[in-house]
Amino acid sequence: MIKNSEKQTLYLAEKIAKAKGADETSIGFSQSRDVSVEYRDDAIEKLTESTSQSLWIEIYANGRYSSHSTNDIKKEALSKFIENAVDMTKYLEEDKFRKLPNPDRYKGQTQKELDLYDASLEKLTPETRIANAKALVDELKGKDKRTISISSSFSDSQYYSRILKSNGFEGEREGSSVVHGASISLADENDKKAEGWGYYRARHLNDLVDVPTTTAEALVRAQDSIGREKVETGLYPMLFENRSAGGILWRILGALRGSAIQQKTSFLDGLKGENIASELLSIMDNPHIVRGLGSKIYDDDGFATKPMPVITNGVLNNYYIDDYYGRKLDMEPTTGGTSNLEFGLGKRDGSAIEKDLDKGILVTEFLGGNANGTTGDYSLGVAGWLIENGKRTKAVGEMNISGNLKDLLMNLIEVGNDPWIHSSFRSPALLFDKISFSGN
Amino acid sequence: MKPMSRREFVKLSGTGLAIATLPGFLQNALAKSSGENAYNLYFQRFGVDQDTIRKVMAEALSFGGDYCDLFFQHELSNSIRLQDNIVSSASTNIRLGVGIRVLKSEQTGYSFTEDVSLDAMKKAAKTAGGIASSGKKLPPVEFNFPSFPSYYKTDVSWEDVAVKQKVDILMGINDAVFKEDSRVIKATVNFADSENYIMIATSDGTIATDYQPMLRISVGCTAEQDGDRETNYFDFSARDDIRFLNPSRITRLPKEAVARTVKLFKAQDAPAGELPVVLAAGSAGILLHEAIGHGMEADFNRLGLSVYSEKINQKIAESFVTIVDNGTNENVRGSINVDDEGNPSEETILVENGIMKSYLHDRISAKHYGVKPTGNGRRESFKHNPMPRMRNTYMKSGPHEFEEMISTVKFGILADQFTNGQVNIGPGDFTFYVKSGALIENGKITAPIKDVNIIGNGPEVLKKITMVANDMKLAEGGWTCGKNGQGVPVSQGMPSVLVSAITVGGKA
């Protein structure tokens, strides 16, 4: 990836902005290269390949602030772009909380090699990518006579970004990601088509989960969804597979953001230091996991990242507070966004927990729904299995779960030991008691 | 065709990004224009001519592709935000580039470049052309320049609206929110506008252009009562200019936002289980978008993946049910004069008097089915390939009355504000989230309810639409439809309807 010329572009942009009247600036540049192959049945369906770039600039002038971005960074265009950006800032109102961060927060970046970039992706040929995508489809051929169509994708991307803040921060990040996935469509009754998918993401190609595991998941999901029925409305224990638990728990993250606290739209406002969940729940934000999908050495404010406990044994330790909302709240900022979420683990995995369940619902998929971050109320569409005496007795679908996230967190009764490491949300299987399911 | 704006205005009023990226020679080409001249303005905007386009196409087709198109885009967007009683945040964004697509039968090769020079375009064309591997096709000798009706005539460019004018509108709304109800503790107003200039050149020999304006204004507020807090919002979106924000709309924004918020204090938990549901006229069209719209997008159907595959000409609903996807509603958010493949927009009838009529087509699917394109080939930007996408999807008015409908329900709910929905195309299961509504008991609307998800199966729910009122309304807010990672602006509409039974996800 190119580097040096962009460094000069950032210095130039800073110089222009200051000459036009900016007091301080924060300028960033990012570039990414994305290649993907989609394969269906016997042929390539789509090939895409491109490189894109973007430059953004935040302007601080006379106590005023605005931000701007463009993908047109030719020298002449850039100069006019910045001139207009500085000009526009004058017409806004003063905001005493808008300042660049205290430079002390830039210091202390981890010295650990996070290994987020896989240079071997640069050598991937189109033929290899196509072969990888085709292998996923081929693995599923002939596996189920109800098959209507099989598709797959293989894609990889590399990104590079650089930030320059006028009070002494300069940083660069690079990384890569590679994803492969397969999906299969099976004929079901009443013209319905059952769908199943499996996909995995990794920073490095050689960390990608193998083809048979990925395709087997797609097939099982499709087969499991055939003949789904609703069960009777009522309160049931609910078990989430590790990969699906994030589907509900990420909804608490929005309520932990400094903007939600400051704007009074968080049901977790005022609860720092309090018990908000079962003591089985511990979550750590860890930005320094080697090859972690959410790992980073500095955050969007330029703060050097460090591990941060979010919830420990049910007690809320920290909110996600960025520099601006920290000032508005008169609270010490932590970091504005999540990195990798690591959970305190239990003693056994999801399938062992399932075998011990007398009667409950195993949730494997979500479909839509929403949560109210201000009150904690949620209502989400789900599908999965009815479990009776440790056995999957009926495929269930077209059902909703509803309640309040405060109660949900308190009703956590078991945590698995099987974190889902293929996401930055590394949840293990989770078992909750007394969840309201609506069906028939 | 919209006239290009007067550049000197920019300097005086702080309008933001405006001219920043335009090549210098464009500044002499600002007069009003029509016909072939209009196309010349687009050529100048992108710094290309017919000959350049032919050269890029020759490269794209040099490996034997059947067809190629070039999608040029220049989009200027602005947004400003009021929070904590001041307008202290603004942003602008410029997006410029060209996407190049090559088709070989139903296979797609796609690439884009943000550098609209001949060399960069030829390089991207070569990449996209790699989908084919034998033969060679020649680019068109002549291009034709069709003209399209305009469904969003505007007079004022967003480039000519001063920041100060927007700031004043936002401040006025903020004051009104706090005056409206003493329980309000926080208000946020977001205002976004954009101008999207597109030009599509196809190897069939067509060059089409469009100017697509858009605005969205959204008012959010949080209120507190006896230690409880509630948040809600109200928004407008339209393909229009600043005149859209007339005094009556500016008055409605804070009023509705506050009314929707404080109403939630009285709301009780929604019931759970299969119940009759009355959907209030307007944005309830989200049900159609999820229950049938996506399933009728022909890319899923040509592959046999949709629950609606092979249902054309079958009766799927009561005879008073007629559903359309229309790109021609005046100034509506999902309207387009031309789709992103250069085909004219239209009203496409999905279901007529209960009978399934037509899928929504893009170029590939229209060719597959041997039908004429329906103008549904849309994409998020030049970085994305087009697919069949909805525009404004709605049901036409029917024979019943709203009050009549309510009176038939013994126990059920009325749903009137919606935030989001989703569907699984294959099985047809879909959901939509009801932000607020009310209970219906013994034929009367009683207590308000809030925050409940509704889940059903598309074809089954369509059969259960047992009454349709004569009060069709289009949604007023800013809906965005996501598919395969691409977002496009859409709208939807609905008369009040009664669904006799559907699963309501309240608390057991």
Image: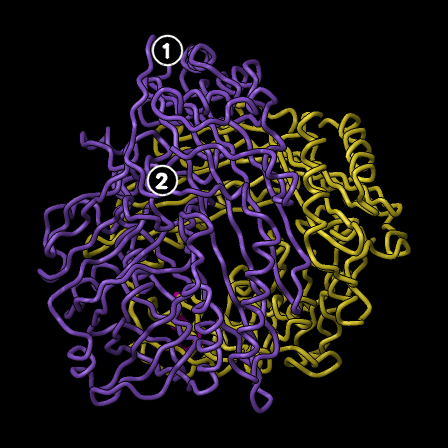
Chain colours: A yellow, B purple
Q: Which residues are magenta?
A: A383-391
Q: Which mark identifies residue A150?
A: 2
Where is residue B227? Give x, y as percent: 60, 89
For mark 1, name the chain: B
Secondary structure, magenta segment, majority class = strand
Check disc 1 and report the residue beneath it.
B139
Task: Tell me, yes or no, if residue B285 can be seen here.
Answer: yes
Discs 2 and 1 share one subunit = no
- Quadrant assignment for the C terminus of chain A: bottom left
Based on the displayed image, in which of its 4 quarters is residue B498 positioned? Answer: bottom left
Where is residue A191? Give x, y as percent: 20, 52
For mark 2, name the chain: A
Q: Which mark identifies residue B367?
A: none
From the viewer's perspective, is the residue at label 2 or at label 1 nearer?
A: 1
Task: In this rendered view, identify the residue nearer to me: A352 or B344.
Answer: B344
Q: Is residue A388 magenta?
A: yes
Kind of residue at disc 1: Pro
Q: Is residue B138 magenta?
A: no
Based on the displayed image, in which of its 4 quarters is residue A121 positioned? Answer: top right
Name the residue: 36% across, 8% down: B138
Task: Give the SS element for disc 1.
Answer: loop
